[in-house]
Amino acid sequence: MAQPGARVVMRAAGTALILDVTYGRLPSVLHWGADPGSATGADLDALARSGTAPIAPNAVDVAPSLSILPEAWTGWLGTPGVTGSRAGTAWSPRFRTTRIVVDGRAVGAREPGDGVATVTARELVVEATDATAALTLELTVVLDDSGVFRARAQLTNTGDGVYQLDGLVLAFPVPQLASELLDFAGRWGKERVPQRRPITVGAHRREGRRGRTGADAATVLHAGTPGFGFAEGEVWGVHTAWSGNHLHYLERVPDGTQVLGGGELLLPGEVRLTSGQSYRSPWVYGVHGHGLDDVARRFHRMLRARPQHPVSPRPVTLNVWEAVYFDHDLPTLLELAELAAELGVERYVLDDGWFGARRDDRAGLGDWTVSPEVWPDGLHPLVRRVTELGMQFGLWVEPEMVNPDSDLARAHPEWIMATGGRRPVESRHQQVLNLGIPECYAHIRDALVALLDEYDIAYLKWDHNRDLVDAGTQPEGRPGVHEQTLAFYRLVDELKARYPGLEIESCSSGGSRVDLEVLQRTDRIWVSDNIDPLDRQQLLPWTAQLVPPELLGSHIASGVSHTTGRRHALSFRAATALFGHLGIEWDLRQATPEERRQLRDWIGFYKEWRHLLHGGDLVRLDVPDPTLSAHGVVALDGSAGIYSLASLAMSTVVSPGRVRVPGLHPQRRYRVRPVFPADLSSLVRPPEWWNDGDGVVMTGALLGLAGLQAPILPPEHAVVYLATAE
């Protein structure tokens, strides 16, 4: 009987994904890793045959075929791709492929004995059905020019009754030579803390049940060869692109097979498909590289190639939150605008406290009209002066949230997400608005539209300050996180379409909504509410494992951190913040004339080099001394590099010795010199090559292999080096 079948080779940027779609089965992975070069059909036949597992004692008599949507009927004893049932039946579907489409062209059916078609493609779509379970499936795999692929599944109920879908996940095998895993943990103010462990039999499941991505999200779940680091080791990684409840997992079953997978984490009864209805999973991204830097750079190149990626220079931003908090008065805010403009600031953001009865965090949230008590003339006097000074005006909003003490909550208590006939516990004195209710969605959308129509607003800082607990739709209380997430996407998409050029920052208690799906529609993420530079030395480089520096909100903090209470020199605060989308979060009225002069210097340096900082390749150093942090950005053409060396604590040795300066072209010669303001010069112990101010000239090979003698830095200080090709 004729049936479609093919082996599909997907390759880009030195990586390859080879998929086997034969014998009516769902696609399985023959190879995921470095590009092996050209391969004939005979080569792929041999690859498929040589990868068939032996039949083990006390196992099924046919070697399991592990597809990217794992099926239990094959004998796979790990997590199944589809979890659900039709009132207790159809819980173990067996799909048969009915159509294969590569790059928009269908693969013809072939008779037995005709051999298997071999095709090279960038996109694969596989349609399959299970007539008994009355389900159809569509799997899509797309390979990007960066070598990152993404995959998703769509399940449709073709039967008469309801099919309750409890889970739909995709999984990709990784070889057993990947024996260590690395992902991230975290909390408010300390997001994306790396954690590493050996891979053992069983599942490492990272479930996000917060209704948002979460400060503790896995972000990217990596599996790699022993001891893999920034520059060394073979690394595979997955990322689930979804801003609601989600899953990342690594699973090794007893026969040694191990997979990386992910998908949406559905609440009980959240997706009930009636006849003809479909559910489409989020994209699950897969990436392979040599070292963590290679993995990160692939994500960065993928994001930078998007048509919606910001192309204008990232404006230096002043956010006034830590300067005034809720204490809004026009003279103070105008003074801050004047001071910011003198320093070269290009965007001014008015934070929380401008609307309704919002004099603190206990009231007013949800009432998105300018407070007449605080702003009798509206925001017009401030917006007008900010734009006259040549700066963009930005505004803080939190559209998905509401204070119970608000006009909106009193008028529409049924719009608050709840279940079980009770209100969820409060967090930050607020509840969650159910944007899945059309009337609620329209109300919030129209309030934002009214603001954007009245004022010249170039930027919204979009916050989301609590987890979704008991997030149901009243009155029946059915779970609503899935619909809430889709409604948030739809709302942002609507505003972006209506106001071309409007930029939006994804802020969620700091960095709790950081994923590739929210980044499809936003222009910046707020890395953390904690801008203490000591903590940001960890936060920025590790968030850059997924997100390029130009999308990382990175502000120069106050002298005394509002989050930790630690005091730091301006040079440390600025050298840390430089490696992102630079801003200031400081009451500039408290800065001395000398501090303002130094700020102007740092801002000037950022403006001169932001094309490199925001367009180059990330490099991070595996420095053996844990008290040091070293990283940088190198121009794609090898013309220059900017590096940071920071001392995080007192080391057990006096001198850090030579520190490598990697990533430069090995044959070109570079002048390397320190860039630092005056307040650091009396604290560092400069090595000899600093003395004449002109630095030192060396080849890129010597800089990368031998490096430069580092200064003896006091704890919690940093220096920045500039390397330019001669």
Image (spheres, rainbow, N blue to C red):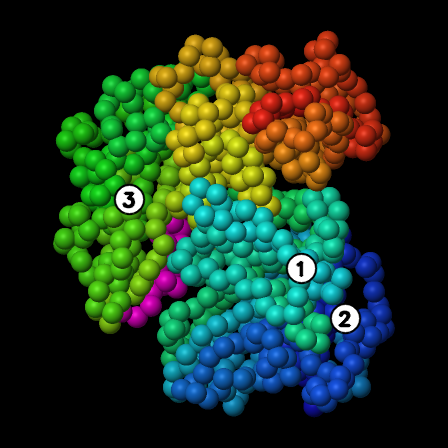
Number of the front mark, 2 or 3: 3
Q: What stretch is highlighted in magenta?
A: 477-497
Query: N-terminal of the two: label 3 or label 1?
Result: 1
Which image quarter is the C terminus in?
top right
Whether residue 502 is visible to the viewer of this picture, yes or no, is no
The quarter of the displayed image where residue 635 is located: top right
Q: Is residue 26 left or right of residue 574?
A: right
Mainly helix, strand or loop, the magenta region? helix
Query: N-terminal of the two: label 2 or label 1?
Result: 2
Three-letter code, disc 3: Leu
Q: Tell me the crowding category of disc 3: few under 14, some 14 to 19, or many 20 or more residues within 10 angstroms, Cα based.
A: some
Residue 726, labelled with which disc?
A: none
Position of residue 179 measured from the top left corner of the image (x, y, whole percent): 71, 60
Q: Residue at x 70, y 86 (%)?
A: 59
Q: Name the residue under label 3.
A: 448
Q: In this view, does 573 lie above or below 88?
A: above
* For the residues bearing labels 2 and 3, Cβ distance under 8 angstroms: no
Position of residue 493 measured from the top left corner of the image (x, y, whole percent): 40, 51
Which image quarter is the N terminus in?
bottom right
Q: Which residue is drawn at 38% across and 19% down?
A: 588
Three-letter code, disc 1: Pro
Q: Tell me the crowding category of disc 1: few under 14, some 14 to 19, or many 20 or more residues within 10 angstroms, Cα based.
A: few
Q: Name the residue under label 2.
A: 118
Position of residue 194 measured from the top left corner of the image (x, y, whole percent): 58, 48
Q: Mark 1 points at which residue?
A: 198
Q: Which residue is drawn at 74% across and 30% down?
A: 659
Query: N-terminal of the two: label 2 or label 3?
Result: 2
Number of the front mark, 2 or 1: 1
